[in-house]
Image: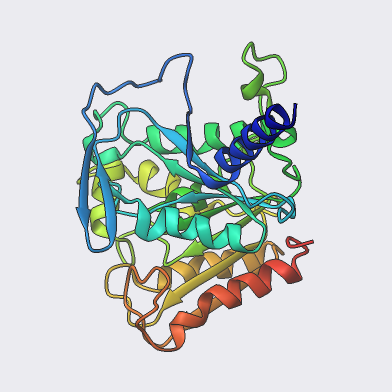
Amino acid sequence: MTKTIFLLLCGCLLGVHFLYGQEKVIPLWPEGIPCENGLTEEVEQNPRGRFIRKVHEPSITVFLPGAGQANGSSVLICPGGGYTLLAWDWEGTEMAKWFNSFGVAAFVLKYRLPHWESEACRDKVALMDAARAMRLLRSRAAQWQLDPDRMGIMGFSAGGHLASTLITHFDAGQPEATLEVERFSSRPDFAILMYPVITMKEAYTHRGSRNNLIGNNPSEDAVNHFSNEEHVSPQTPPTILIHANDDKGVVPENSLLFYQALRRHGVPAALHIYEQGGHGFSFARDKGAVKGWPEVCRAWMKERGLLK
């Protein structure tokens, strides 16, 4: 009897370990992928971790805090990579583990990359995937013990463009949809934008991201549609933006434009521009003042009531 109880306890502990200590990958479109591309995914390993190209099956990778540590908040993380690749660990899984360290559930989004998509689908697939991921989080809030009013999004560089697109182009869901997941809102409750691409307009855009998303000779309508500073409204969620003044890849005017739009519409907003840091600094562990951004972000989340 004692041995049986011991084995049962071990099984329970292993189950908890699997839930909280392992990565779980959940496909976004089990019913069939819209705009399916037929690509074969490529993964490159370098000193900054894994970099993914040619995403075929979009998914979320689940990172839950340890048992008893969760505070109910969650964040969907969109790694950057110019809409060509995903800096999967540098701007994804490492961030997820950091959020877990203070009780926030994190979900890393593997979204399809416009560079590899057909002309008919390239400006649609990333936003499709981000919106479906947010609906999926909402549909499983009870299962993962998530507060449905504290579900945010974080994006880096082109992933920041995707995140800023979702917070300005969300919808409330379709109440009559056959699929339950489609009945949920795609609106995040807050946003963390890291050195984000915001505008598609010539003066300040990131040319590579723009070309990959809307082509080398986009229409004026396409440029305006994906210049997210033009689509902020009072319903846009509270946002913090973090950038470096010496960013030559995505100039800080991108964050400035979005911050000014947030202010015009009365949306709670914070903007931190560090003198040095360049582009793509992630945790910036080997840099100067910019390496303090994680605590700035965490303090902002606390002030917003996201770390109860």
For the N terminus, the image quarter is top right
Q: x%, y% of residue 19?
A: 59, 39
- Residue 168 seen: no
Tell me what residue is drawn at x 74 percent, y 41 percent: 145
Q: Is residue 261 visible?
A: yes
Q: Residue at x 29, y 60 (%)?
A: 206
- Which residue corresponds to the image point at 68% horizontal and 61% vertical from the top-left? 265
Q: Residue at x 31, y 67 (%)?
A: 203
Looking at the rendering, in which quadrant would you find the C terminus? bottom right
Residue 257 or 69: which is nearer the viewer? 69
Q: Nearer the viewer, residue 204 or 77?
A: 77
Instruction: Give the side of residue 29 with respect to residue 171, left or right.
Output: left
Q: Is residue 265 left or right of residue 213?
A: right
From the viewer's perspective, tell me whether residue 236 is left or right of residue 83: right
| Tag count | 0
Q: Position of residue 299 (x, y in %)?
A: 67, 74
Q: Is residue 32 above or below residue 228?
A: above
Q: How is the image coloured?
A: rainbow
**Height in image: 97 above or below 297?**
above
Q: Position of residue 247 (x, y in %)?
A: 32, 76
**Residue 261 percent coordinates (x, y):** 58, 64
Given residues 202 and 129, the one toward you in this image is 129
Quarter of the figure with residue 111? top left
